[in-house]
Amino acid sequence: MQKIFQRIINYLLDQYAVVLVLLALVSGATYLVLITDIREQEGNALLVKISSEQGQLIEEINLSLTHKTYLTDATEVRKIDSKIISNIIQLEESHAALREGVRFIREGQRLIHIPGQLSTELRQLYFEGAKPLDTVMREYLSIARKLQRIPAGEITLTNTDLSRLFFVYTPVILDEISRVSLIQQRHSEFMLSATINKQHISFVITLASLITVGFLLLHPLISSLQEKALIMKQEADNVINTTHSLIVGLDAQGQIVLFNQHAQNDTGWSEEEIKGSHFFKRCIPDDNLNALETLFNNMMSGAVKFGEEIETKMRISTGELIDVVWNSTVLKNSVTKQPVMFLATGLDITDRKDAQRKAQQANIELAEIGLRLQGEINLAAALQRAILPSPHINLPGMQGQANLLTSSEVGGDYYDYYNIGGFHNILLIGDVSGHGVAAGTLVSAAKAGVYPLIVSGITSPAEILSSLNKTIRATAQQSLLMTMACLSLDARTGKLLFANAGHVLPYVLRYQSHEWVMLEASGLPLGKSLDTDYRAYAMELTLNVGDKLFLYTDGLVEEESPSGEAFGYDRLEAVLNAYTDADVDTLRGKLLDALAMHCRGTAYTDDVTIAIVVHSDRVTQASTMDNEVSDIIRISENFYRQGEHPIPRISKEYVVFLAEHGYADLLTRFSQDGICRILPRHDDVCKKLGWEHLLNQHHDSPSDDLFALMPGNAEHRQFHLTHTEDKLFIMEEIQSWLADQGRIAAEQLEALMVILDEMTENSLYAAPRDGKGVAYYTKGESRELSEHEEVRIDIALSQDFLGLMITDNWGTLTPGIFLKNIARSMEEGVEAGIGGVGLYMMWRLADYLQIRVHPQKRTQVTTLWDLHGTVDMNVDSGVQFLYHSEHEAA
């Protein structure tokens, strides 16, 4: 037996070289398998890093685009554009690599990429489903490049593409990228687990081979093989330590047994001081503990095989907290198949969370800025609406309609009309080059330039345009231009003068004619040149009663259909000539309907304004009324106080009570007798206004009362309400304008503002009533005024007088209501909320009050103050209520 064993030993010794070769092959094969897995693991770690960094690139692109919306410095804009382009290129390259399934392997000292193949799960995510990630990412990159090319001054937070980028694509991409990162991380963890398992198996096989052969022949080689195994383990540890994730291994008791280098760097704890610590007690705050600890218990017990992604806070060595997203797996005993280690791989997302919080804060601040800017735009729009006259044109010998449709909150179109001297009607229509706030500002400048022309009584269109040309040139400095057509009609003779400043040409329709004819006159736009002589190109013609005029802005003919075809002059003239017999309202409706049908809607790209007027009748110049007082019945105070006297049964507007002293105690009797014209004989204000002039106020005048009453030239501002919310804006504008004049006493300004508030409230809520006297609207109700409703405010300031007038088209106030209300306020006192107090305050706060009513047609309330006097509520001021009706008002 001993000889047989000896022979076997001798044989093996003879085959020593063969055994060494076999052992070398086993060791080499084991090394190649492990080193291949290790190199692939390095590539997987890089893929995890790339997928994680995509989210940061998207957030940086979004944040840079947000910054670009409010940058004005060219250098900063170039820097931010360069940053956006760099991030887009990086995002494109990383997306291409992940989409193509590129693999990274180590070659020498660097990682190189080689073609690879996507897993089924990643392929479905990138290329399948309703919104594949590849498609969404391409669209995101396309929009991002488009937004980057937009100049900084033209991109705003309301940009449709920017909103889609932030709120449509970004949330989807970030969610899908997180899923890609999770899949890559799981794959990396699986490969890492497989590598570790292979390492153990290889180590066992190698060790078993060494032990088997070593006991026979190769005992000297065991130490060498052990050294190689140790090297392979170190390389595996290097992979763990070089990955860009926190890798923490826990034993069954939750104690730390593995803490890679990245975890040490992020937390500040060395492996020596953290190993053996209870992970959950030391590293996870109590309020974040439950979910992760529950997952640990379930996976180590085998109840759960795969862990869901969990986000928690993690305490670091300084006591601060960082944000970490954990993905977990377990390593099992190769024999018992029981979990022996809980492996948690974490991604530090603290910087990303901080960036998200900063981006959210930036969005909140930008939203606040946007709201403030929108509020300012709304205020500008309200003021612009207020400075335009009513769309219902009603001038002596000329009636018509106007319509202004703006393409944005503040428009660049302008129309205006007014009367000079009772028979000269001026009609203006203009268009600023562009629209928006800048164009609206120029419209306001034009309106301001018209005021002195009204006061000066200029009726020549050429002179009007020349004056406005200087105003626009001084305001815009040629940065914006304005076209304008100006027509002046003498309603006594029908003589029409027309001058043009580069505006589209108006049309005229002769009475009973069936074809509109274009009026031709040329001239440079306003603001272009100060040397333009508009008189050289002006034209003159005579209108007959019944002739019509049509004015418009170029937005009407340039509006395009969805296919890009302009509305054009042919369509315009076709509509005009098809309705030559139609009245103004019908023609206006047909034109707007035709435009809306052509454009498939009313959302226009440019402002559209039209005005249609008809020369309705010849006007006879009113004769001077200073001596026409023979029809007035004067009642002296002494006679009236002697006892009750019958009042003549004539219209009460012909009866004037001449007060010698205070007359407040007679208000109740005035109410009973219907006396509604009371003039204090010794009142300085009445003397300045002119006694004969005041006595003749019962004669209706073509001019508004404010301008008929105020002596001399006056500066004038006019405002039209289109919404109840306009009141506050207009009141602020009036108060600011009057305060800037610097010559109005504070008490007079305060009195005017009180009366303005009361008068406006009456016109908006008290005046609108049905035939039975029932109010249409509740006081304080927010509403838009109908197109047939007019509430107009006029302010005038002369050398001696301050005047306020408000006009509405209801005509529901009667002398009886007026007198009863102020008499009741005198007897019962003033109390807020009680009807009639507003009328009483108007009488008490003003130096002169005049109310003119055309029943069911118009109410005009005018108040005047003597700038050289004071406000004294104990003085019984002059008041006249003029009610133009064939029947006595109750």
Image (tube, helix red, strand yellow):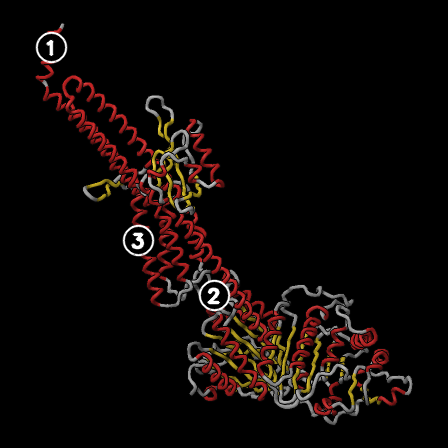
* Lower position in the chain sequence, tag 1 or tag 2: 1
Dot label at residue 6: 1
Figure quadrant of residue 736: bottom right
Looking at the image, residue 819 sits to the left or right of residue 48; the answer is right
Mark 2 Cα within 10 Å, few/some/many (few <14, many 20+)?
some
Most foreground residue, 744 or 11? 11
Q: Quadrant of the C terminus?
A: bottom right
Q: Nearer the viewer, mark 3 or mark 1?
A: 1
Residue 477: in sight, yes or no?
yes
Residue found farthest to the front? 273
At which x and y percent is residue 772?
Answer: 78, 67
Residue type at numbered disc 3:
Ile
Residue type at numbered disc 1:
Gln
Residue found farthest to the right? 643
Q: CA distance from mark 1 to mark 2?
A: 107 Å
At which x and y percent is residue 605?
Answer: 47, 65
Dot label at residue 89: 3
Mark 3 Cα within 10 Å, few/some/many (few <14, many 20+)?
some
Most foreground residue, 825 or 20? 20
- The secondary structure type at the circle numbered 1 is helix
Mark 1 Cα within 10 Å, few/some/many (few <14, many 20+)?
few
* Whether residue 870 is situated above or below residue 12 in the rendered picture: below
Q: Nearer the viewer, mark 3 or mark 2?
A: 3
Looking at the image, residue 709 sits to the left or right of residue 357; the answer is right
Q: Which residue corresponds to mark 2? A: 605
